[in-house]
């Protein structure tokens, strides 16, 4: 076999993934890794594809191999934690993310993921602190902003949630999660006009759950 052989398998796996054939793509990546066991990008792709296919143990194993190749790489640690969390190992994921935070102290992604483990473990105070830091690092990124807003809303801090969400909405007006949370914040602040506008925008989401929540908000506004 030549070096081109694993590259050809990688290319074929990418084509299969584009067609939605996730399981077959994962098998080809595994075959490519057998030919090139020190090629880090193959493991990175396998982690992501295995998670899409529901193969969480495969994802964890691939992430461990990434860490073997470069234990000090914060992105590899992050992927390891995401795979561990998907596999149900919350304590393991949290430990890896704590390490990743020391490796990448300015990473909002690591903070957001670590906050998710804290939420699972009912440590909402630390989750809120981590998400506040993540939002300061990435003030318009929908992911951390939405998570932060949810915790603020749960804590009765709708005005703060609205400020953070409006900043994200300015950059990402089509993000349905941001629009939905803005609708919730505005409804709690008794700004029915804004709440209705944001809920209507959230109804355009492809996510049935988001559409359902937006419809509930609109229904509540109609009876007020």
Image (cartoon, grey):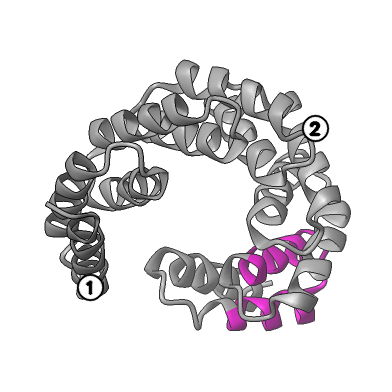
| 119 lies above or below 136 | above
Q: Which residue is mark 1?
A: 15
Instruction: List x then y, in percent, for residue 91.
Output: 48, 16
Instruction: List x then y, in percent, for residue 2.
Output: 18, 55
Q: Main secondary structure of the magenta part?
A: helix
Query: Quadrant where the C terminus lies?
Result: bottom right
Q: Earlier in the sequence, mark 1 or mark 2?
A: 1
SS at mark 1? Answer: helix
Question: Is 121 contained in the magenta span?
Answer: no
Q: Between 43 and 221, which is closer to the camera in this rendering?
A: 43
Q: Is residue 130 left or right of residue 65?
A: right
Kindly identify the residue that appears in the image at 81 percent across and 42 percent down. 132
Q: Quadrant of residue 61?
A: top left
Kindly identify the residue that appears in the image at 28 percent across and 37 percent down. 37
Instruction: List x then y, in percent, for residue 186.
Output: 78, 67
Q: Which residue is mark 2?
A: 129
Q: Is residue 141 left or right of residue 200?
A: right
Q: Is residue 33 left or right of residue 99?
A: left
Mark 1–mark 2 Cα distance, whole angstroms, equals 41 Å
SS at mark 2? Answer: helix
What segment carries the magenta color?
178-201
Kindly identify the residue that appears in the image at 43 percent across and 24 percent down. 68
């Amino acid at each position: 076999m030549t070096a081109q052989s694993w590259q050809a398998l990688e290319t074929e796996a990418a084509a299969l993934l584009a067609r939605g054939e996730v399981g077959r793509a994962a098998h080809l990546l595994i075959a490519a890794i057998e030919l090139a066991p020190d090629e880090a990008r193959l493991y990175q792709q396998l982690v992501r594809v295995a998670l899409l296919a529901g193969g969480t143990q495969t994802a964890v194993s691939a992430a461990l191999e990434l860490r073997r190749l470069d234990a000090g790489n914060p992105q590899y640690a992050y992927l390891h934690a995401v795979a561990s969390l998907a596999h149900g190992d919350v304590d393991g994921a949290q430990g890896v993310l704590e390490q990743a935070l020391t490796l990448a102290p300015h990473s909002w992604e690591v903070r957001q993921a670590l906050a998710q483990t804290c939420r699972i473990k009912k440590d909402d105070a630390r989750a809120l602190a981590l998400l506040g830091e993540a939002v300061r690092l990435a003030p318009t990124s929908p992911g951390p902003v939405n998570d932060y807003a949810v915790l603020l809303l749960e804590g009765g801090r709708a005005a703060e949630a609205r400020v953070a969400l409006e900043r994200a909405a300015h950059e990402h007006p089509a993000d349905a999660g941001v629009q939905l949370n803005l609708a919730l914040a505005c409804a709690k602040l008794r700004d029915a006009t804004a709440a209705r506008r944001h809920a209507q925008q959230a109804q355009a989401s492809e996510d049935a759950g988001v559409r359902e929540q937006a419809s509930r908000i609109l229904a509540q506004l109609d009876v007020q």
